[in-house]
Image: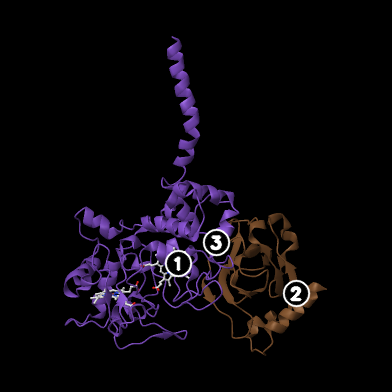
Amino acid sequence: MITNMNWIYRVAILLLVFMPDLYSQSMQSSDPKVELGRYLFYNADLSINGTMACATCHEQRRAFCDGNRVHPGALDDSGKRNVPTLANVSKFKNLTWAHNHLSGLAEQSLAPIRGTDPIEMGMNGHEDEIAKRLSQNECYQKLFARAFPEQKGVITLSTVTQALESFEKTLISDNSLYDQKMKAHKPLPTKEAQAGEKLFFKTAKCNTCHTAPLFSDDAFHQIEPEHQVVYNGMIDNGLSDVTANQKDKNFFRTPSLRNVFLSYPYWHDGSAATLFEAIRKHNLNINHTLSKREINQIIAFLKTLTDNTFITDPQFGKPSIECK
Amino acid sequence: MRIILLIGLLSLSLFAKEVDLPVELNAWKSLSYVGAAKSADELLNASLTLNNASYVGLINTPKIKYVTKPFNEGGTVSYGGIFEIKIPQSGIYRVVLGNASWIDLVKDGKAAKSIAHNGGPQNSGIRKMVDYPLEAGIYTLQLSAGADSTTAILVTKIK
C-alpha cells in the first residue's frame, strides 16, 4: 500500500516538475536556435541606428524580397543589388547574386550586418554593439541560453549569425500550385500555363539554367555580355569582383524562379520592372526567338510557382510575442 | 527658447539652398513644433494640422506604446512617436517626411494602404513622400524605426 502511494507521489512530482516546461515548449518552435534566429531576423537592433532589420529588406509577404529596385542602407547609403528571395536558400551552395566561396548562411549574414559594399545595416566597427544591446534584454538572455547551452548562452556575433542561419534553413517553399499538381500527377489548370510549361522545359530550354525543383542550377552564367550596368555610380562586374578573374566578368548566379511573380523588380540590379522584360532581357543563343504570346504563356506558368503557404506561414513571420 | 532655436536651425539647414517646391508642397516651408505622444492617452497634445508642416520631437522606441503594432517597429536605439490628424474629407493624401521613418496611418484599428512612394525634390530636406487614400475622420499617425530624435512632417491633400 505504502509503496503504491509512493509511486503516485513520484508521478505527481514528476508531472509538476515537467509540465510547465512541456507547456512552454509547445508554444515555441521546437528548435530553440530557430526560434532565436527568427527573433533576430525581425530585430532592428542589428543595425547601427535601430532602423533596419533583415526583414526590412526581406519581407515575407513578398517571398522575402522588398519590391524596390535596390534598398538603401540604414544610414541612407545607396543599395547596389536587388534583394533576392530567401525561399529554399539553404539549398544553394553559391550564395548571393555572385559569390562562390561563402561558407554558408552564417557567414553570408555578416555582409548585410557589417558589409561596406554597400553599407546596409552599418555595423562595421560597431559589431560589439549588437551583443551589448541584446545582453540588456532578459528575454534574449533566455533565448540564447536555450539555443546555445553548450556555450552557456554567450551572446556574440558568432552565435547571432548561427541562429540566423538556423532560421533561414526553415524557409522552405515547396507547396506552390505547380508542386501540388506534380505530386498529384495532374496537369496545370489552364491551357495557357500548360503551354508555358512546355516552352519552359522543352522549346525554350529555360530549365537548363532554371532547373527544377529549385528552378536554379546554382551556377553562374553571362546572359547579357555586352551590357555594363553602372547604377548609383557603382559598377557591378558580378563574379569577377570576387574571383578577380576576367573570365568571370558579368557572370551572375541563376536566380530561383520560385515565387518569382512576387519578387519584382528583377535581375541583379533590379533593372527589369516586369517578368516580361526580365525574360526578354536574356541574350541566349537559342534558335528559337520567343514571341510575345509565348512569353505570356511562360509567365502564366511562372505564376503557378507562387507558394501562398510560404508567404503566409506564421512560423516565418514576425513573432507575435515580443522579446522584451 | 530651445525649440525656437531648433526650428530656426532646421529651416536653415533645410532651405540653405533656395529650392523650387511644387505649389502643393508650399506649406513645407513654414514649420511649427509638435511633440509626439508616447501612447494613445497623450494624443490630444500631439495633433498635426492638415497642410501645416510641423517640426516634430520623437521618442526613444522602448518608451512608446503604439496604438497598433507598426509593421516596422525599430530597435531600442531608434525613435518614433504617435500623432493625431483630422482628415476633413475623403481623398488622396500625401505624408511628407524629413527622415526615413516607417509611417502608419491608422483608423479604427486598421492601417491605410499606401499607393505611392517617392523621394523629395533635391535639397528640399524631404526624405520621403507616401500617398494614401483616406476617408474623412480622425487618424492616428505613427512614426517608427526612425534614425533621429526630431524630424519634420507635413500632411497634405493632393487629390
The residue that appears at 67% across and 57% down in the rendered structure is B63
Which image quadrant is residue A236 in?
Answer: bottom left
Q: Earlier in the sequence, mark 1 or mark 3?
A: 1
For this rendering, which residue is in front, A37 or A187? A37
The chain carrying label 2 is B
Q: Position of residue A303 (x, y in %)?
A: 31, 66
On residue A110, which mark appears?
Answer: 1
**Chain letter behind tag 1:** A
Residue A130 is tagged as 3
Cα separation, mark 1 vs mark 2, equals 42 Å
Residue neighbourhood size for the residue with mark 2, other residues' Cα within 10 Å, grouped as few (<14), some (14–19), many (≥20) = some
Do labels 3 and 2 touch, CB within 8 Å?
A: no
User: Residue B50 location, x and y as percent?
Assistant: 69, 72
**Above or below for A220 versus A311:** below
Question: Where is residue A118 shown, x and y percent of the image?
Answer: 47, 76
In the image, what residue type sits under mark 2? Ser
Quarter that holds the N terminus of chain A: top left
Tell me if residue A41 can be seen.
yes
Looking at the rendered structure, the secondary structure element under dot 3 is helix
What secondary structure is found at the residue carrying circle 2? strand
Residue that label 2 marks: B32
Chain of the residue under the numbered disc 3 shown in the image: A
Q: Amino acid at mark 1?
A: Leu
For disc 3, the neighbor class at 10 Å (few under 14, some 14 to 19, many from 20) is some
